[in-house]
Structure formats: C-alpha cells, structure tokens
Image (spheres, grey):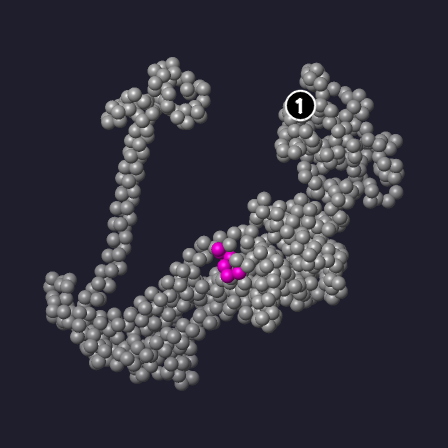
Amino acid sequence: MVEVHLQHISRIFDEKKRPAVNRVSLDVRDGEFLTLVGPSGSGKSTCLRMIAGLEPVDEGTILIGGKDVTESRARDRNVAMVFQSYALYPNMTARQNMAFALENAKVPKAEVAARVDKVARMLELEDLLDSKPAAMSGGQRQRVSMGRAIVREPQVFLMDEPLSNLDARLRVSTRAQIASLQRELGVTTIYVTHDQTEAMTMGDRVAVLKDGELQQVDAPLHLYQYPGNTFVAGFIGSPSIGLFEAVPVDEGTARWGGVAVSLPEHLVGRAKDRVVVGVRPEEWDIAPQAPWARERTEAEGTETASEATGMRLKVEHIEQLGSEAYAYCVPVQESDVRLRGGRIALRVERSGEIEIGDVVDATPRTCSFFDAESEINLEYLGE
Amino acid sequence: MSNTDPTTPSTAAIPATTTTPRTSAGTTGPARTTGPARTTGPAPLPSRPDPTPSTDEVEKDRARRRARKQANGLLGVKVVSYLGALLAALVIALPLYFVVVTSFKTHPDIYSDPISWIPHPFAPENYSYVWNEVDFGQFLRNSVVITAVLTVVKVVLGVLSAYAFAFLRFPGRNVLFLLVVGTLMVPNEITIISNYAAVAQLGWRDSFPGIIVPLAGVAFGTYLMRNHFLSLPTEIMEAATMDGAGFLRTLFRVVLPMSWPTLMAFVLITAVTEWNQYLWPFLMSDTGRVAPLQVGLTLLQNNEGPTNWGPVMAGTLLASIPMIVIFLLLQRSMIKGLTAGAVKG
C-alpha cells in the first residue's frame, strides 16, 4: 500500500513574491495514476520535484507510504522519476543507464542483469541495450528513461512531462503505452503535464493547478462536466468552453443574446442576480439561417432576437478535423453580456454544413453556472 | 512537359500573344527564358524542331555560369584564406625552423653572414654533446617528477574544488569563488619572496616539496572546470541523485565522463605550464640536484657561454619532445570528446 499524501505543502522561492507552490493538499491513492496539470508557471513541476526530494519543502508535510519523508533525501524516498529531457547518462549504454541505480543500491550483479533484461523485454528495448543515448531516437530514449525508472521497482513513479519532446503521433501511442504499463505494474504514479488531453486520457484522476494553488482534483469526466471554477472550465477541454460573463438571472432563468436557459432547480437558490454561464462547444444546437434570413440580418445590422430563438453568431473561422469541425464565431448582436475571449467555439458534426461568413442561430443544451464574483461553480456552493 | 502545368493563366497568356506558340509551349518564365535561348551560341542549332532542349540548354548554360561565378568567388576566398594561413604559419614556423636548423649547425655556421638556411656542415653531434656533457637524464627525470606530481595534484584539486563550487551550497560560496578567481590576477613574481621565505623556513630548499608545494595552488583549473560543470544539464545531475549515486560516485561516473574534453584541455594546459616552469625551480634548486630541464638548459648556456647556440637549441628541442608527445596523445581524446558532445543533440 503506497499512498502519497501532500499536506499543505508550500515552496517559497522569494518571500516577496507569491509561493511557487501554495499550501497544496492532495491524497494520491495506492496504485493510482494522478495527473497534475496546469499552465506554465502553475507550480506543477515544482510540486513533483518536492515529492521527489529535489526541491525542499518550506511548509507542510509529505507522506509516502505512511512515512514522513519531508526532510528525507531523494535517494532515501524510493521514488523514481522520468524527466522531460529523459536525462540519460550520455556516457553509458542503455543497459548501464538502467543498471546504474541498482548498482548504487549494491544489488547483486546477477539480479541487476535479470531485472534489466526483464524490463528491456517489457519495453522492447532488447536491441538497444548496448547503444548509447546519442545513437537513439527520441522515442527510444524515452523508453530507456522509462525503463530506468521501472527497473528500480520504486514505491512511486514521478513523471515530468515525459512525452513533450516526442512528435505528435508518437506521443499518442506512447501515452497509451504508459497508461497500460502503469496499470500492469500497479505502482502509484504522479504525472505532470501541461497538455490537458494527456491529463484527461491518462489519469485516473486529474489535479488542476494554477499559480501554485490546487484548483480541483477529480476524475477526468467529472472534471470536464463539473469544473470547479471558470479557470478549470476554461483549461480543461479543447476547444475551450465559451464563458458568458455577468448573465442576468431572473426567476431561475438566465437570459442573454436570444438565449434563455433555466437553471437546474437545486442551483436556483445559489445563484445571485448575475452568473457566469459556460457552454462547451459540443453543447450547442445549431440552426443555420435560411439564405433570405442571412441577407436580412446583414441588411439590418443588429437585430433584436425574439425570446429564446437562439444566439445569433457569425462564423469567423472553421477548424476542420475530418470527422468533425469546430466553428469559431462571434455574436452578431450587441449585448451587455461579455463573451470571455471574444470568440466562441461550436462543434459542427457534419463538415461542410457551415462556411466562414455564415450566420447561425445557436442554442445551448447544457450549461455550467458559476458565481459571478468568486467564479466558483454553483454546484459546489452552499445555499 | 510537366513544367508547363504550374504556369498560371496570366503568365502563360503573355507569350501566347507576343511570340509564336512554339516558344510559349515549354517555358515557365517566358520573358526571361526565350531571350537568352536565341542569343547564346551553340544551343539553338539542334533545338529547332523542339523548343524544350533549348530551354534545357539555357538552364545548363546559366548553371555553368553560376558555377563559374561561384568558383571565382570561392577562389578569391580561398586565396585570401591561404595567404592568411601562410602568414600565420610563417610567424610560428620560422623561429621554430631556426631552432631546429641551429641545433644541427656548427659554431661558425651559426654566425655566418649571410644567414645559412640549411646547416652546412650537418652537425648532429650537438645532441650527443648535450646528452653526454650535461646531466640531461637527471634533469629529464626531475622534470618528469615535478610535472607529473603537479599535474596530478592540480587536476585533482581543480576538479574537486570546481565540483564543490558548482554543486555544493554553502554560505560564502560566491565570495570564496571570487577570491579563488582573484588569485589569477596576482602575478606569480609578487608571491615569490614570501614563498621563498616560507619554504626556506620549512627547510625545503633544494628539494622536490620545495619546488612542488608552492606551485600546487590551483585557480585557473577551478575556474575552467566549475564553469564547465555549471553548463552540464541539471536534470542529469538530478537523475543521478534520484538513482542514489553519492557525491563522489556522481563525480566519477556521471560528471567527469561528460567533461572529458574540458578535463583533457585542463590536463594539457597544466602539464605544459608545469613542464615550462623556470623561475621558481631555478630559485629553489641550489645545487641542480632537483633542477628540471628548463633550469638545466640555462646551466648549459652558462657552461658554454652565450656563444655556442647549437647544443642549447638541441637541448631545447629535446626538452620539448615530451610535451609534443603528450599533446599528440591528449589532442585525440579532446577532439573525440568535442565531436561526441556536438552530435549528441
């Protein structure tokens, strides 16, 4: 049973600035694959390095397997790390790279050889064992660095963006390999990435960090459907969620730009007179306007939409992905409600349905509602 | 004829109206290609029935001209670079040549007017004279001992202190490092008197410790190696930490193998500097018992008076052979290391 508990850990580089990691508390369960995700500078790598013992813990406690390791040296924590640059020793062959930690731990030679061979078979590295890193491709180096971590049979794997140096295609396949390997080995893993797709697809749970503070920890789907605040909502999901600010709520219905959405009953009491409404790109129903209507809109300029006919949007850009497409639109009508980011993404299921310059009426099916001030999801707020 | 396809309708239209259809058929840039095709000599004759060969010829011609131009330009650059190299080589080689030539000259030949460029008569006996008359073997042994010990001590101290300055965090680290680098700015001659007094008090005059210990201080190596260590990727050092490698094991298994070229440069510079030490060993070796070759050579000069340069030059050449050998040996691994680092990526 190896659980990792972070209890209010902080890393303060400069007293005058905000901490790089600010009172983060996190419980990683035994055998769990937890991804730490956040934009650059969010403190996710620092957090990982603190768990590894490469960075001191200024405040708080770290427990690994029930043991307080806050003050322990990295070598005494029995954790293995996979680095972004792989950090293979250039003067050693793959075999020596993998055996190095075991030799340091004075493991008998025969056992070292057996363990290296076993891991090499597992990762299909047999042919590379006697090559040096300089003679390997990026993917191969990545596998060797994984092997170097696995061969130690550590309590915890720590991975710091191990896929970010690979090309897109290799990244996708390696992503799946790492996830299944982790499941096979059952070792508690903490994986840092800035790529939310990686975070969503690999992790049992995803922890989102921003400015050194933990925003939310949840299963990927739950995180996507019920983001804790507007930051998580915007960060998770690609293209990102459309956020309408300061939408007036009247009698349990939020109305803006031709759209009227009723708040779920349990949220009505929690909403103040204005909320932030978030709509995912796939949650829009799109009705392309008839050509005559399009002409009329253009001729009349702004047009007051009748109640709940949908939001009138003009397509500015289309991202074609083959099976689906995303249309990036701007609202046609002037409104008090500001659209964060100025543009909204809509998923179009049949490509060719919409063209750039088209005007569409879009109606949201499902929305998330956030408090206008704290920007916290109403789902998580008390009455 | 595939090269006709990419022509845009607008450019294709121009030749169609201004020239015959024949010329417009195979050209991509009509205005430019049809002109030179007619004016340049040999090409048009065979190409009449079909216009494409003519454009081919034009292309070839143009390529030839371009190549010629390039070659002319390259030739100019080459001539200038060779002249520069020749000048540099002359500045270095001429004195060296005279050292070699003089070592084979007889006494009158050295002072002949005009200068003789080739020894006449050829006098290799200068070498046997040096070897037999002066205690060359003894001086050589002393030089080897002093250089070897100093090189080992300096490299060990340099690497260890650099490693500490680069990777250990301790209070006053930067101030201490500045102090070490600051000693580089102090000329050796200034410390000689105090060093002499100290060594004399210790009773080390005319002994190897007397020569070696005051010379064993290292600042340049610390500076060189520390800066190199700092340029190593920190992630590799961290990987070694995670892999449970201790301080010295990280140094020997990870850091030094990655620093091979710099280390070799350090060894080479140290060896050459110590081999060529003159002033301090000269002051220390009263009897010549522990004097190195460089001091021995001056004894030679004094014995023979300043006039007979033949044996002195022969001695100088003999004295430089070990360093040339060391350079040839180390240079290989230096270059090997450098290229390995460059390709690693």
- Residue pushed farthest top? B17
How busy is the neighbourhood of tag 1: few (under 14 within 10 Å), some, or many (20 plus)? some
- Given residues B168 and B263, the one toward you in this image is B263
Residue on which disc 1 sits:
A358
Residue B319 % position (x, y): 28, 72
- Given residues A47 and B215, the one toward you in this image is A47
Residue A173 % position (x, y): 61, 47
Q: Quadrant of residue B48?
A: top left
Residue at image coords 74%, 66% = A67
- As displayed, is residue B135 above or below residue A153? below
The number of callouts visible is: 1
Q: Quadrant of residue A255?
A: top right
- As displayed, is residue A270 above or below residue A296? below
Residue A134 % position (x, y): 49, 56
Residue B158 visible in image: yes
Magenta highlight on residue A134:
yes
Residue bounds of the magenta highlight = A129-135
- As displayed, is residue B277 above or below residue B82? below
Residue at image coords 76%, 49% = A218
Residue at image coords 79%, 34% = A366
Query: Taking A122 as reference, is A377 left or right?
Result: right
- As displayed, is residue B341 above or below residue B303? above
- Given residues A347 and A4, the one toward you in this image is A347
Q: Chain of mark 1?
A: A
Amino acid type, callout 1: Asp
Residue at image coords 15%, 69% = B105
